[in-house]
């Protein structure tokens, strides 16, 4: 793994939630921190709650209802909002995200969009910054730790 440019990381929030509803409610609040243009990387094992959190974030941005936000793991990308202002990407099935280059993220940023990327760590250093990185951790049963960081290079 090549080392990229030095990162400046600031922790914006660290919470524990105890239900999917609580995670979605946190996402709705957190939406204030991701106005476009913004790339949001979501990291965490299978079932840690990445999609659940994005439901709240997309709803908080006013782009779709929570129940209409579903996992893009088969389709790679979902688009929400009347003018395609919010994208939701899932890189789970991608073998080596670095081969994707930057996914055209710079163009999307210029277009005033917010982009959520599940398995965002697969992009390596191909991320236009500043961006938000969210790490989710399964603490057992319905408990999850969620750490939100702003990353600048
Ligand atoms: N506190 C919690 N926060 C989020 N989800 C929770 C919580 N407690 C239980 N869950 C359950 O955990 C599962 C999380 O699934 P979700 O699809 O959001 O995870 P994911 O990280 O996107 O998984 P994948 O890697 O498969 O995309 C859901 O079934 C949800 O109901
Ligand atoms: Mg998911």
Image (cartoon, rainbow, N blue to C red):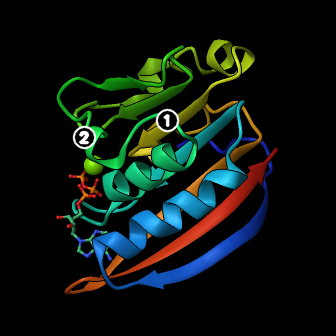
* Closer-to-camera residue (24/77): 24
Nearer-the-camera pick, 85 or 62: 62
Residue assigned mark 2:
71
Helix or strand or loop: what does disc 2 sit on?
loop
Report which quarter residue 12 is drawn in: bottom right
Return the mark for residue 123. 1
Residue 109, relative to residue 89: is it above or below?
above
Residue at 22% x, 59% y is: 46
Horizontally, is 39 left or right of 77 in the view? right
Residue at figure coordinates x 49%, y 73% from the top left: 146
Left or right: residue 92 versus residue 14 is: left
Q: Is residue 80 left or right of residue 32?
A: left
Q: Which x, y percent locates residue 3?
A: 66, 45
Residue occupying the point 39% across, 32% down: 89
Instruction: Name which of mark 1 and mark 2 comes first in the sequence.
Output: 2
Q: Secondary structure at mark 1?
A: helix
Q: Nearer the viewer, residue 118 or 88?
A: 88
Label 2: few (<14), some (14–19) or many (≥20) C-alpha neighbours in 10 Å:
some
Instruction: Examine the rendered structure and indicate whether residue 39 appears above or below residue 27.
Output: above
Place of residue 83 in the rendered image (x, y in percent of width and height, measured from the top left):
54, 14
Is the CB of mark 2 within 8 Å of ligand 2? yes
Which of the numbered marks, if any, corresponds to residue 80? none
Rounded to the nearest angstrom, the CA distance separating label 1 from label 2 is 18 Å
1 or 2: mark nearer the eye: 2
Q: Position of residue 86 (x, y in %)?
A: 52, 28
Q: Position of residue 42 (x, y in %)?
A: 46, 52
Task: Please state, as top left, top right, bottom left or bottom right, where the C terminus lies in the image.
Answer: top right
């Amino acid at each position: 793994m090549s080392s990229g440019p030095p990162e400046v990381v600031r922790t914006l929030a660290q919470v524990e939630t105890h239900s999917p509803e609580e995670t979605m409610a946190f996402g709705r609040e957190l939406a204030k921190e991701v106005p476009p243009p913004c790339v949001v990387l979501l990291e965490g094992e299978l079932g840690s709650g990445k999609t659940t959190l994005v439901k709240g974030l997309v709803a908080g941005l006013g782009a779709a209802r929570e129940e209409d936000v579903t996992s893009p793991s088969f389709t790679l990308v979902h688009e929400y909002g009347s003018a395609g202002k919010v994208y939701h990407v899932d890189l789970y099935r991608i073998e080596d995200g670095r081969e994707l280059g930057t996914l055209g993220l710079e163009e999307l940023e210029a277009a005033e969009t917010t982009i959520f990327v599940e398995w965002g760590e697969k992009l390596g250093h191909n991320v236009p910054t500043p961006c938000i990185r969210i790490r989710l951790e399964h603490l057992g049963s319905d408990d999850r730790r969620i750490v939100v960081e702003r990353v600048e290079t």
